[in-house]
Image (cartoon, helix red, strand yellow):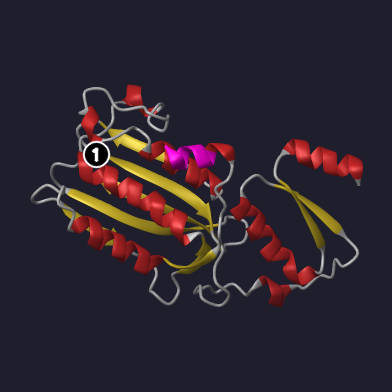
Amino acid sequence: IIDISKLKSGVVNIKVNRVRLNDLIRELCKIYASDERLRKGVEVKYKLPLDDEHAIVLSDSTRLRQILSNLLDNAVKFTNEGTITIGYEVLDSPDTNKSNFIRFYVVDTGIGIPLSEQNMIFTKYHQVKNIDESMGTGLGLAIVEALVSKLGGKMLLKSELGKGSEFSFKLPCLWRSGEHKSEIKPIDKIANPNFANHHILIAEDAEINYLFLINLLKKSNVKTSWAKNGKDAVEFVLED
């Protein structure tokens, strides 16, 4: 309830730091594989497409851990047999052939979610009908969706009753310089424009997207300002 209140009031801040994706996912997998609630025979596993050296990004490690932990927690609750898989994949931009996004996912072979319930699953206090209410407050997925949105992404759900669910989200990818194995030359070696006499207004509600943009622009000497919504952007232009 405190987390939801903070998110609603906008007091949750994003703190960008260095995240070792493989270490994070292996650690979470180990924790939930030994969870006492895990049914006998259910396997918790992971998929890591990059080696450790190159799986390093800039994001909010605390919030990313919180999101994935909530998704794994749900999977453990509602999977009676089969597998739970946590992982990520790197998505390429069709324009530059450079990896710009990471899609994280948690897939289970659990009880699944009826189609009639899927549109409401991220609503506060909502619980799927015919599921024991003692298994949660109905806040976990609402918190997950709010945090993913705060990081600049969007939650997606694929589920079939009796066959399992896949929760996933795509986030802007801010790679540590020189740590992503890419055949593409870094942008600063292709061009280094000088925009010292220019001023760019960035209208963006997700802080991680704003940080991504200023990281791209930092070597151009351009002056930037940040408007967190359309109203602020209009007021800034009118006052300038």
In the image, residue 18 lies in the stretch drawn in magenta: no
Q: Measuring from the top left, give residue 102's x and y in whole percent.
A: 47, 57
| Extreme residue in the front direction | 2
Q: Measuring from the top left, give residue 112's x and y in whole percent.
A: 25, 34
The residue that mark 1 highlights is 164
Q: Is residue 133 above or below residue 204?
A: above
Q: Quadrant of residue 1?
A: top left
Q: Measuring from the top left, give residue 121's x and y in whole percent.
A: 37, 30
Q: Nearer the viewer, residue 215 or 77?
A: 77
Q: Nearer the viewer, residue 167 or 74?
A: 74
> What is the chief secondary structure element of the magenta stretch?
helix
Q: Nearer the viewer, residue 132 or 224?
A: 132
Instruction: Name the element at disc 1.
Output: strand
Q: Is residue 205 above or below residue 58?
A: above
**Point 51% across, 53% down: residue:** 171
In the image, residue 6 lies in the stretch drawn in magenta: yes
Left or right of 51? Residue 176 is right
| Extreme residue in the left direction | 40
* Residues rendered magenta in the picture: 1-7
**Point 13% across, 44% down: residue:** 81
**Point 36% across, 43% down: residue:** 167
Left or right of 16? Residue 231 is right
